[in-house]
Image (spheres, rainbow, N blue to C red):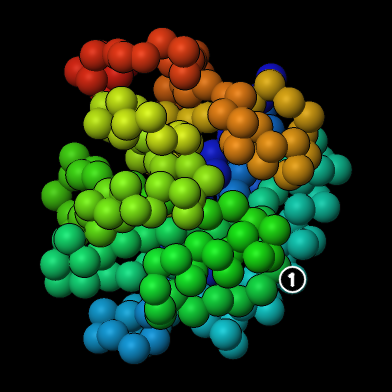
């Protein structure tokens, strides 16, 4: 049984830590798996071009080095911490309007992808690599920041395009996603060290990417709240539906 955080950003996009620093940060805390999921922003929008100019997005030019470092750190994490490191990205379709914005996690990826194009084409391209497509923070994150509502607004037509939908992002648990009947995943969306206090996903499977992916697809998992100062877990099992949203967001 182990904790995983499958939505983590490095300084290849807008995170503060390098990939090796993230491996040590999570490995020293006993985590069993993490996914590095740096942003890939659109090439044909003003916001996407701005992110690229500011080096807040992976690009075709930086992606090979990203994968090279991930490969080396995957081997080190396994050897030093018995921790799985999953290569990923976050396809980021940002708009001035919340209802047009959408973020898609690709877990287990091996090839660069642009964030431009139709949602279905993007999720199917992720899956064609053998990866998982995850709907990232599809409802309000409960923070004063741009929101990404596009996937949630289209959830009925897109529900079979995703392997899971984030039911928590950082310290906030999304009751509406929990009650939706969709497959779920809880992550921190970590950019800074202090964001480690957040909801995580707990697995009871082998420590391997294939076993983790299988557990996500079958929803053989549970959710816990992790506090770095007091690493005690508040359990939330999938069979507990429904739960009180206030209790979940204030563990």
Q: Is residue 95 above or below residue 244?
A: below
Q: Nearer the viewer, residue 130 or 48?
A: 130
For the C terminus, which image quadrant? top left
Residue 72 lies, in percent from the top left, at 79, 61
Left/right placement of residue 123 relative to residue 107 reads left
Residue beneath label 1, please? Answer: 68
State the image quarter where residue 45 is shown.
Answer: bottom left
Left/right placement of residue 187 relative to residue 47 reads right
Q: How many marks?
A: 1
State the image quarter where residue 43 is shown.
Answer: bottom left
Task: Tell me which residue sits at (30%, 19%) in the image.
Answer: 248
Q: From where the camera sits, is residue 198 visible?
A: no
Residue 16 lies, in percent from the top left, at 45, 59
For the N terminus, which image quadrant? top right
Residue 151 lies, in percent from the top left, at 31, 55
Q: Nearer the viewer, residue 120 or 251?
A: 120
Q: From where the camera sits, is residue 174 visible?
A: yes
Residue 70 lies, in percent from the top left, at 70, 62
Q: Is residue 48 above or below residue 109?
A: below
Q: Is residue 128 above or below residue 138?
A: below
Task: Tell me which residue sits at (44%, 66%) in the image.
Answer: 120
Task: Tell me which residue sits at (66%, 74%) in the image.
Answer: 111
Left/right placement of residue 25 relative to residue 204 reads left
Q: Nearer the viewer, residue 197 or 179?
A: 179
Describe the element under mark 1 as helix, strand or loop: helix
């Amino acid at each position: 049984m182990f904790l995983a955080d499958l939505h983590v950003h490095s300084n290849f996009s807008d995170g503060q830590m390098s990939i090796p620093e993230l491996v040590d940060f999570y490995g020293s805390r006993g985590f069993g798996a993490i996914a590095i999921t740096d942003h890939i922003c659109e090439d044909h929008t003003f916001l996407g071009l701005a992110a690229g100019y500011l080096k807040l997005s992976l690009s075709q030019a930086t992606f090979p080095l990203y994968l090279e470092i991930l490969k080396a750190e995957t081997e080190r994490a396994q050897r030093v911490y018995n921790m799985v490191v999953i290569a990923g990205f976050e396809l980021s379709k940002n708009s001035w309007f919340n209802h047009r914005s959408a973020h898609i996690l690709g877990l287990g990826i091996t090839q660069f992808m642009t964030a431009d194009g139709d949602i279905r084409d993007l999720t199917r391209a992720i899956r064609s690599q053998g990866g998982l497509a995850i709907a990232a923070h599809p409802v309000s994150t409960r923070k004063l920041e741009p929101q990404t509502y596009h996937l949630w607004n289209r959830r009925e037509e897109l529900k079979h395009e995703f392997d899971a939908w984030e039911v928590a992002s950082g310290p906030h648990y999304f009751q509406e996603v929990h009650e939706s009947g969709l497959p779920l995943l809880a992550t921190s969306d970590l950019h800074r060290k202090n964001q480690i206090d957040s909801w995580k996903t707990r697995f009871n499977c082998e420590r391997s990417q294939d076993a983790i992916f299988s557990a996500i697809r079958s929803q053989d998992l549970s959710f816990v709240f992790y506090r770095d100062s007091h690493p005690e877990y508040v359990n939330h099992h999938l069979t507990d539906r429904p739960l009180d949203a206030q209790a979940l967001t204030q563990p």
